[in-house]
Image: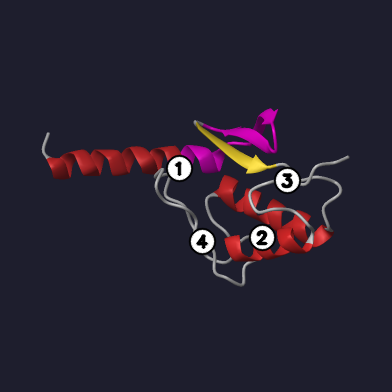
Amino acid sequence: MNGRAAKRRRDLELRVMAAAVRAASPVLVEVKDDQEWWRVGPAVFNTPIIRDSYPPELKNALLARRDALFKGECPCGARWSMRRDERMQHVPACAASDQSLKRMASDAGVEAGEGPRED
């Protein structure tokens, strides 16, 4: 199999997997540290725990990001392609963007990449 044929085959496999993910319902399989691990069809995703103590704006933004991840696209137009080295590129104004989430987390006293501890 030449390089182009291998790439076409891999692209087809990724499209089939993406379609299976979009058609599946997310199932929470594990909660570890500050992360939830979800199985969605043949894929497994980890997302931050959304704590009751979070401000509503942060909770809604994290829910929007989780929903976009599970559906494969965000209302802002961000999409993923199932490649390990690619991330969804939300527009900066999107509540689910890295920039927005970092700002909201900082405002809530949460360090980026960590959930706040419930004492």
Q: Which mark is residue 115?
A: 3
Q: Earlier along the polypeptide chain: callout 3 or callout 1?
A: 1
How many residues crowd around disc 1 within 10 Å: few (fewer than 14), some, or many (20 or more)?
Answer: many
Q: Which residue is mark 1?
A: 18
- Measure the C-alpha gap from mark 3 to mark 4: 24 Å
How many residues crowd around disc 4 within 10 Å: few (fewer than 14), some, or many (20 or more)?
Answer: some
Q: Residue at x 60, y 65 (%)?
A: 99
Q: Are marks 1 and 4 in contact (CB under 8 Å)?
A: no
Foreground mark, 3 or 4, reads 3
Quadrant containing the N terminus is top left
Residue 38: x %, y % from top left: 62, 34
Q: Which residue is mark 2?
A: 101
How many residues crowd around disc 3 within 10 Å: few (fewer than 14), some, or many (20 or more)?
Answer: some
Residue 111: x %, y % from top left: 69, 53
Q: Earlier along the polypeptide chain: callout 4 or callout 2?
A: 4
Q: Are marks 2 and 3 in contact (CB under 8 Å)?
A: no
Magenta span covers which residues? 18-41
Instruction: Locate residue 18 relative to residue 8 in the image: left or right.
Output: right
Q: Are marks 2 and 1 in contact (CB under 8 Å)?
A: no
Relative to 7, say whether 30 is above or below. Answer: above
Q: Residue at x 63, y 60 (%)?
A: 96
Q: Secondary structure at mark 2?
A: helix
